Image (cartoon, rainbow, N blue to C red):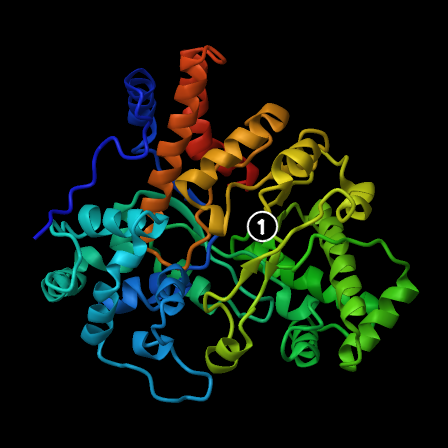
Amino acid sequence: MPALDPHPDRLFPADPTVRAIARRLYATVKDLPIVSPHGHTDPRWFADDEPFRDASALFITPDHYVFRMLYSQGVPLESLGIARRDGGAVESDPRKIWRTFAAHWHLFHGTPTRVWLDHAFSTVFGVRERLSPASADAIFDAINAKLATPAYRPRALFERFNIEVLATTESPLDDLAYHAKIRASGWKGRVITAYRPDPVVDPEFEGFADNVERLGQLAGENTGTWNGYLAAHRARRAFFATMGATSTDHGHPTARTADLDAAECQRLLDRALAGRATADEAERFRAQMLTEMAKMSLDDRLVMQIPPGSFRNHNPALYGRHGRDKGADIPMPTDYVRALKPLLDRVGNERDLTIIVFTLDETSYARELAPLAGHYPALRLGPAWWFHDSPEGMLRFREQTTETAGFRNTVGFNDDTRAFLSIPARHDVARRVDCRFLATLVAEHRIDEDEAFELAPELAWGLARRAYRL
């Protein structure tokens, strides 16, 4: 069977001179601790520290990168064990799910998913054969046997991966019980939360009015009034901060912001709570809430993340069967210069505020985002994200932003993943690609080698720690 043996020079340049520089740089950062300041792993894993159930539950079920590719080739999500909203039957045999995955392994040729999975199989589990229908059962059994041992429980892997801090993401309606359990356990691993208010700031989110009422109950505020609604957010943000949160995250479809008067804000809130908001009114409400959240961040110092530009749940049939976040989110063109102006007029010049902006629209890097971050003290550029969390995407990000924004107006790397085992793999890819980029600058005499050696650990570790106030 074909061997699985990732090359030590993977992702480095083919040119031997540049490759040698990249190797030297990488040697200084490959073992640095991992700072994972934004992601969507399940805090219950670390609270309960129970063994992962099986290889399919670990690698397939939580990873939309995996199952969206299979779905694109006609594999029903039911055959991968993805739950249905109506409780209908789905495949429950993890071995069958794994065999389906292995039968379609060829679909991942040339993708970052293949790089991440090969890294996890070989580095974490010691697999030495390439996944295929012929090797599927043996690899499945080998992974499951290790998952049953103490060394492969979530906390042990967290420590083995050398994770310094990991942020999960929760709704304001979450009681953060699993985070409390982690704290009470005495375990030294640092798992913190982040404030993701989408269910209570998006009038088009299912159950919006009920969610806002629940927000008021949790905060002890009347969320039917604009002032009470804002006070409830402040209270929940303060609670999240007591549980370690250093950031907020806002999954809006666009980057549009607004600065409306209180009367108009109350009118929009009334319309949203009554279920009568038009699409434009819903967008204006979300736009106002980005500005409100930025003003709150100026007060409570929570770092604000704005990752717009995704048409969420684009496939209505899939959404109807399986719900949100099932691989049907599609990037859209995004305006930042005009959209962010109301917010930046209010807070863009504040040096004590950090707003990290991401994009799925790469055409905006050089034209809009790098010039904006290269000017406004409050703005920083998030790394190549989601569909662009790839070797080519990371290189394009550096090539299109560095000349205008430099390195120090970026925030290092964050993995933004639901798949725990992909975290070390993703950070390894980012470190390799950044070392490749730095090595090219050295070889072209655009920076000196000692400067590259100063920058490499910043890109791998230091920038993220400081940007997220960790």
Instruction: Give the total number of marks visible in the rendering.
Output: 1
Quadrant of the rendered structure where residue 410 is? Answer: top right
Give x and y (percent) for residue 128.
11, 49
Residue at image location 42% in from the left, 33% down from the top: 460
Vertical comparison of 237 with 266: above or below = above
Residue at image location 60% in from the left, 53% down from the top: 248
For residue 133, side relative to residue 38 (left or right): left
Q: Examine the rendering and report whether any part of residue 228 can be seen.
A: no
Vertical comparison of 466 with 102: above or below = above
Q: Examine the rendering and report whether any part of residue 374 can be seen.
A: yes
Vertical comparison of 316 with 87: above or below = above
Residue at image location 81% in from the left, 72% down from the top: 269
Label 1 crowding class (10 Å Cα cut-off): few <14, some 14-19, many 20+?
many
Residue at image location 21% in from the left, 57% down from the top: 152
For residue 72, side relative to residue 396 (left or right): left
155 or 12, nearer to the observer: 12
Quadrant of the rendered structure where residue 161 is? Answer: top left
Secondary element type, mark 1: strand
Give x and y (percent) for residue 287.
76, 58
Give x and y (percent) for residue 102.
21, 64
Vertical comparison of 255 with 31: above or below = below
Residue ranking furthest to the front: 73
For residue 310, side relative to residue 67 (left or right): right
153 or 76, nearer to the observer: 76
5 or 424, nearer to the observer: 5
For residue 209, side relative to residue 246 (left or right): right
Residue carrying label 1: 247
Amino acid marked by disc 1? Ser
Give x and y (percent) for residue 113.
34, 52
